[in-house]
Image (cartoon, helix red, strand yellow):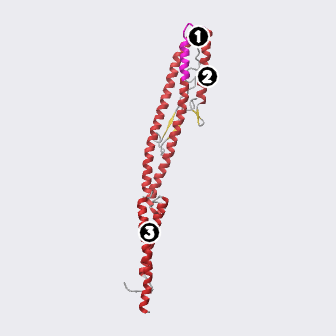
Amino acid sequence: MSTRINHNMLSIMAQRNLQSTQHSLDNAVMRLSSGLRINYAWDDPAGIAISENFRAQIASMDEATRNANYNINMLSTAEGALSVIDEKLIRMRALSVEASNGHLTDTERGYLDTEFQQLKSEIDRIALTANYNGLQLLDGTYSAGTGIKFHIGTHNIRYNDYYYLNIADMTASAIGIGDTNLLNTLNAQQSITTLDAAISSKDGERTRLGAYVERLQNTLMYLGIAHENAVSSESQVRDADIAAEMSEFVRAQILMQSGVSMLAQANMVPQMIAGLIG
């Protein structure tokens, strides 16, 4: 290389390399301090688009998981109310069997019927007051029509991401015991048959709600697995490899020190050339 004073090419080259090293050092510091490989769109334009798509899916999975848990809690509330109704129906059937026996007087059957009617009223009260977050569950509000919407997916496809659940009317009249009484043996005998049908109806509804809870629990398991894999994929795209970034940081530090030293040496070259003409 020829010797010149006006343009110190060694210094210019050293400055360019130093700027490149500074950029690498800045990136390493940014990634180590943030934990992210992609901090700005220009760090990896394609990568940030992929990462943002994963983040949207992850956020939606979080909400779908919460929805499924809310739905389980709601169905547990309805099932709990049905379990209490179950106890009342069993006691009413026992009273009906007792009242069917001919050894009782009408007065004694009247005593049995008093308890019987109170149990029936309690079934109505439970059915009419079973409530979850303002939703009436057992009074027939959702026994027909579209029902209650369960949105437990991340998209908007019916049956895949959401479906509707109907809950049967569990009031005394709806399950067929509204007019029952134990005032005579004939009525008591008829009540046994009527209560068997009511118990069967109640059992069917409890079974159906239990199956939906099981289904939602399986949904939660799937969402957990999908969430885990989506987070892992997003992390691979966006997160910094700390070991690799630390190695890059140390390399850039060494090059920075070397570059500064070489720049100082390059800046001394014009002085040495000037000595030739001094």
Q: Mark 3 Cα within 10 Å, few/some/many (few <14, many 20+)?
A: some
Q: Mark 1 Cα within 10 Å, few/some/many (few <14, many 20+)?
A: some
- The dot on residue 184 is 1
Q: Is residue 273 visible?
A: yes
Residue, disc 3 = 253
Residue, disc 2 = 121
Residue 45, located in which quarter of the rendered image?
Answer: bottom left
Q: Is residue 175 left or right of residue 232?
A: right
Q: Earlier in the sequence, mark 1 or mark 2?
A: 2
Kindly state the secondary structure of the residue where label 2 is placed: helix
Q: Is residue 61 left or right of residue 138?
A: left
Q: Is residue 129 left or right of residue 227?
A: right
Q: Earlier in the sequence, mark 2 or mark 3?
A: 2
Task: Indicate the position of residue 47 as horizontal and vertical percent values.
Answer: 43, 58
Kindly state the secondary structure of the residue where label 1 is placed: loop
Image quarter hosting the N terminus? bottom left
The residue segment tinted magenta is: 87-105
Tag 1: amino acid: Asn
Instruction: Please say if 58 is above or below 209.
Output: below
- What is the C-alpha distance between the residues marked 3 and 1? 99 Å
